[in-house]
Amino acid sequence: MKRIRQVEWSGDTGEGTIFFFVDSETKKKVSKHLYISYRAERKEILVSAKTEDLADAKRELKRLTRSRDNAGEGIAPLATPKLERVTVADLLDANLRRCEAEKLASVCEIRYRTGTLKALLGPIRAVEFRPEHVDQYRERRRKGDGTLKRAKAGATSIRRELEILNRAFRYAVQRKAIAFAPYIELPEIDNVSEIEFPPERVGELVSRLRKLKTGDPLPDLVEFMSLTARRPEGLRNLTWSQFDSETWTLKIRPEKKGNAVMIGLSGALREIIERRLAARRLGCDLIFHRSGRHMRDEKDRALFAGACAEMGLAYGRDGGFTIYTVKSTAVGLMNDAGLSHAEIKDRSGHKTDAMMLRYLKQRPERAHAASEKVELYLAAKREAAAEKRVVGAERVAVFPSVSEK
């Protein structure tokens, strides 16, 4: 006897169907219980509802098609026919539209890296994405695949691209475009340079930056960074709403899971803010800006490289100086000035001593200063010991002899 399926009710999200089995000739119902059909991993799963009541069957369908319950029971993640057509490229495009709508400062970089991700991972269906795809992506990027110039990518670039991919998956889950986000392992990196910009040449650096392009905000940004150890990305996004003109302080929001800080604007820092007030643009709330627009990292790097060339200093991450080396200089200057670790963290925003100390570099001057402190301490101890011996000798001398008695 041939049996056909008669649709009785469909789930609200189209994830499953409840139906009876009927005879193809008599058209009469031949199944006692209702049946449920739903899709998972591109397969149709058919189970009995074990009830004749439609309401109970609906509740069972809802239970089976909830990813949380499925995960708890070890059932494969759901994938409806619509979800199976969603590709990684679709998710990346949706995430890029979100970034553009939110007007993120890094949208240009996100757009460029999204293109690289789409070139290597775009055609893969989202429900089929696995950790092996991440491993393959890393290897291909190290070889230079994914870009027109075929430049080999380092750990920092690969991590940034995978962060965008991870965000795209999580955004898709939030919008319920897909049921779950896969685990994406990010490469471990330590992007802190092993050197710091020479503290004694920071003034020369700022002067040369001013000469390279008159009126550019980068010299002020670099000088501010050299005194506070703030990250350049954070300074580019500083707004006047964070400035208190009555107390002349800046309240800086947390960066990279750090702490919020308050910077007192005195001396050179006050002069910098006064210059920025003079350069303030109508309709622009940014403290550091170029013609009322966000400062771009590419332009800053080009100017910094030009100043280093004029100063005869190597530029670049491989043994040279970058804007980030100025951050290390600031931590070193604050340490040399006698600020405690707690005071340095109150300016840099680091949560722990370990995070802050990554930026404190070893220098000959610092090494000699430590030795001098030890020597001064030892000299004081020797002097105290000598005074103690002299006092003891005087006491012995004044005792009367036996004959005098």
Image (cartoon, rainbow, N blue to C red):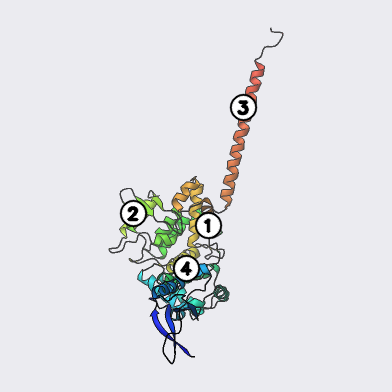
Task: Identify residue for label 3.
Answer: 387
| Along the viewing direction, whichever of 54 and 328 lies nearer the viewer | 54
Tell me the distance, in whole angstroms, between the alpha carbons under discs 1 and 3: 44 Å
The quadrant of the picture occupied by the C terminus is: top right
Q: Compared with residue 164, is residue 331 higher up or lower down, i.e. above or below?
A: above
Distance Cα–Cα, label 1 vs label 2: 29 Å
Foreground tag (1 vs 4)? 4
Q: Is residue 141 left or right of residue 401?
A: left
Q: Earlier in the sequence, mark 3 or mark 2?
A: 2
Mark 1–mark 4 CB contact (< 8 Å) = no
Quadrant of the rendered image containing residue 27: bottom left
* Kind of residue at disc 4: Arg
Secondary structure category for the residue under label 3: helix
Q: How many marks?
A: 4
Disc 2 residue type?
Answer: Phe
Q: Mark 4 — residue?
A: 68
Let me know if residue 276 appears in the view: yes
The spot of residue 322 in percent (x, y) is 50, 63
- Cα separation, mark 1 vs mark 4, equals 50 Å
- Position of residue 288 relative to residue 401, above or below, is below
| Outermost residue toward the top in this view | 405
Most extreme residue toward the right is 403
Q: Quadrant of residue 10?
A: bottom left
Asked if marks 4 and 3 touch (Cβ < 8 Å), the reply is no
Mark closer to the observer (1, 2)? 2
In the rendered image, which residue does mark 1 sit on? 196
| Amino acid identity at mark 3 | Glu
